[in-house]
Image: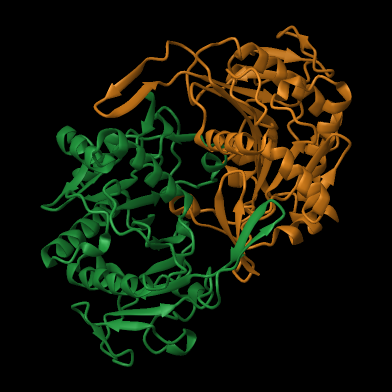
Chain colours: A orange, B green
Amino acid sequence: MIELRKDIISSRWVIINDTRDFQLDVPQPMSKEAVGACPFCVGNENLIPSPISCYDKNGAKINVMDKDWHIKVIPNNKPILTIEGNIIRKAEGIYDKMKGVGAHEIFIEAQEHDDSHLYDNKQNLVACILAMQDRINDLRNDTRLEYILIYRNHGAAYGETVTHPHFQLVALPFIPKAVADEISISKKHYEFRERCLFCDVIDQELATKTRIVMETENFVSFIPFASRFPFETWIFPKEHTFDYRVLNDKNKIEDLAEVVIGVTRKLFKALGRNISYTLLLHSYPLKENKMDHFHWHIEVIPRLAKYSGFDLVSGMYVNPTVPEESAKFLREA
Amino acid sequence: MIELRKDIISSRWVIINDTRDFQLDVPQPMSKEAVGACPFCVGNENLIPSPISCYDKNGAKINVMDKDWHIKVIPNNKPILTIEGNIIRKAEGIYDKMKGVGAHEIFIEAQEHDDSHLYDNKQNLVACILAMQDRINDLRNDTRLEYILIYRNHGAAYGETVTHPHFQLVALPFIPKAVADEISISKKHYEFRERCLFCDVIDQELATKTRIVMETENFVSFIPFASRFPFETWIFPKEHTFDYRVLNDKNKIEDLAEVVIGVTRKLFKALGRNISYTLLLHSYPLKENKMDHFHWHIEVIPRLAKYSGFDLVSGMYVNPTVPEESAKFLREA
């Protein structure tokens, strides 16, 4: 199949071409010896900054000195952005710049270094989701911030340096262009049709069924029609919600944990336990109070081949797999 | 330095943060044995499709059977898009798709497999530039096509499979989003100021001087203010021109060859001969006849560290090098 497909959310044409070779390149994780002492393991607390907050197995906040933590949040000791100072916006001739202000936090997902149990343990992910909501609620009060990215980079291909399971949170004083584009395109759709673009996509995927990976009562995951990367998988709440934090129904949170664990397990089963993936929450801009045109979601993007980024610099994406076939493969895994 | 800088051409914020580690990862080129018979070498013509056209050392078209070719253009035997058929645009529910129609050609840059002499040989690159102009002129008559990408992916990190020096040309029935964004942002600038945005950038770079890598009579190369990647270098004609093909002055073409060779030599000298880079021509959409707001240019993007593409999926770019320092390093190389 050689077909051009347009991603309706980003307005990006993608070349679906399975006549091209697809060279699997799955780097092995680093050995324990190569990694050295794990800074996130119990006993090595001297290697990391003091915790910001800790949570118990139900996701309830506990004292940061409590040894029985299930989720521990610490500041990144080499942050992308620093929390101190005011955002000073300046011109440099015709260019714009500002001070590198923001937050960069690590969610240590478990005391255990080995992550295997996390792919079975729904309860642990529920606690982590609640911890994230708590941190977002706190950071949202900081008026310097515009957007919060939450992600897990798993595996050697995503440049993971610490293999102890962890999420990262980056709070930014700007809206990343990938998200800003999604928002502006879905806004145009809303203005024209008075419907959420993402809801339309979900409806079509549920009706077509061929690209569905997994479905639960409240969530659906599918391989997008014009996916850029092999086995790229999206997860959406079925009901329209722009705000990830409004997820306060315990059943729904458990349902989310189930689909996230389900998708990653399927990826491991279908493609091998050593694959790398990034899991990225697309949330809404912090300063919005209501967005009828935005629908929060999660993108899971495996990295199965060596990646040069040529697509990024050229704007030309070639996907050597057919989304419907990949979805079938994952569905049956 | 931790600073946020906005790229004026893409409207993208980039985090410049040199407190972050920058792990060099320069894969070795494949050995001759691992590569096997080179399909672009003389004597192996049975491995490749028949040539589309050939050019002599002055870039003049010669008979495709002439053994004394300097540039040979062949169709890619595993093309991204196929040249046959009509573009049939269809809906699939709310989605859009079309037939994968386009062209994918290879410019074999020399009979010699070893590319060393190309980084000294201005005359050879001049012939190649003329050959590209000839191919663009031909493909421009094909009304199905909207855009032509020309690029050289050099080195193992860019997934180069044939090390014999070659450029690639891909003709697309759509405008890649990276280019479409550049065009729409520069159009807004033009509407507001009645000046070319790229000309403004060039003026500022020439005045500031700190980010200049190299300058000739007609061209300037610099590291952009908000560069996404270490040692990303842009090359612009100083004079406003939207169309790469209008470069018909022999002195100007030689000048372009000089700056392209100069920049790549500086990258090799500063960073090592095994680095990978992509060189990409940003040309104008084929169906435009005049564009006051667009200015053709070349992007040279080295790939020095393992690249996961997390920036692409998140929209958050972190550059661990300071553009002014990188430019000084290259200037002095």
Q: Position of residue A12 (x, y in %)?
A: 55, 50
Vertical order, A265 against B148 (above or below): above
Taking the spot 26% from the left edge, 48% from the top edge, the residue there is B292
Horizontal side of B38 relative to B313 (left or right) equals left
Tell me if I can see residue A42 in this picture: no
Nearer to the camera, B112 or A211? A211
Q: How many marks?
A: 0
Residue B264, horizontal then vertical, whole percent:
27, 56
Residue A27 seen from this side: yes
* Residue B1 percent location from the top left of the image: 36, 24
> In the image, residue A76 lies at what x, y percent?
56, 22
Left/right placement of residue A19 relative to residue A271 reads left
Quadrant of residue A320 in the image?
bottom right
Image quadrant assignment for residue A242: top right
Rendered position, A62 above or below A160: above
B27 above or below B121?
above
Residue in the picture at 20% in, 63% down: B247
For this rendering, which residue is in front, A233 or A188?
Answer: A188
Q: Is residue A285 above or below residue A16?
A: above
Q: B152 or B239: nearer the eye?
A: B239
